[in-house]
Image: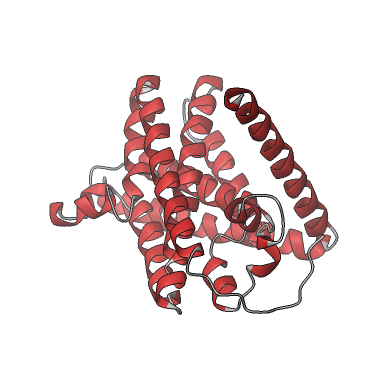
Amino acid sequence: MEGVQRPGRLRAYARFLGLAFAVNVKSVLEYRVNFLVQFFGMMLNNAAFAAFWAVIIGRAGAVGGYGFTDVMFVWGLVSTSFGLAHVLAGNVRMLGKIVMEGGLDVYLLQPKDVMVNLLASRTVVSAWGDFVYGFIVLALLPGTDLARLALFCALALPGALIFAATFAAAESLAFFMGNAQAIASALSEFMLSFSLYPEGVFGKGYRWIMYSLVPSAFVAFVPLRIYRAMDWRFVPLLWAIALVYAALSYALFQAGLKRYESGNRVDTRI
């Protein structure tokens, strides 16, 4: 019986996430000018980064073992993964604030899983620019074909899951520490900074951090090696690592939820 119920629950959550995504898209498109400004503004911001690296590598040659194509692939992949995480789980970096303000009450009263419901109830407009920008970068890289596009997508999805899981775990510290915004913000900055620079520029003493507490390696460095070799054999391993981070993040949230005290707010959510 349990085996029959579990696929049914998965389908129900898939429908719920699909509906939440559709509602978020409709709410964003109600303000189309704002959407377009943020969308193209983020893409221009990312393009400035590409221009910066073009100048640096053009003058200095390879940096940390990365050529311009490597840097652009990493930037494109990280951009798409980061964007997808915030398109689908827009509240992931608002979680701590919601906890501190007692805003979880409205989610506790609904039948869906609290964490899933909370994260999926919002989308970040500028993140759409990040998401699309990665595919534009990939299209401009030499040798891009359907096989490389498929591998890019297979690598971006676990990257998005790792981003969401890491950010949610950092924000969940609010359950235990009260105001954990400084720690969560620092972790977010470290995660992005480590992901966007060649692995070789970091000393060996720092690399263990990027394979554990701040898992930038699994959204940038490891995917680059897989993409260079066009080796699909390691993609399932990357997915398994992403699921481990997601499970740990979920467990931390659930442990914190037991400590949560209602903010006695009177809110409604339709």
Identified at 40% across, 27% down, the residue is: 235
Residue 76, x across and y down, in percent: 49, 44
46 horizontally vs 206: left or right? right
Q: How is the image coloured?
A: secondary structure
The image shows residue 185, relative to residue 130, as above or below, that is below
The image shows residue 85, relative to residue 236, as above or below, that is below
Residue 37, x across and y down, in percent: 72, 63
The image shows residue 182, relative to residue 212, as above or below, that is below
The image shows residue 183, relative to residue 167, as above or below, that is below
Identified at 62% across, 45% down, the residue is: 132
Q: How many marks?
A: 0
Residue 240, x across and y down, in percent: 39, 33
Q: Quadrant of residue 268?
A: bottom right
Can residue 120 be seen here?
yes
Identified at 42% across, 68% down, the residue is: 173
Image quadrant occupied by the N terminus: top right
Can residue 144 be seen here?
no
Residue 254, x across and y down, in percent: 48, 56
116 horizontally vs 36: left or right? left
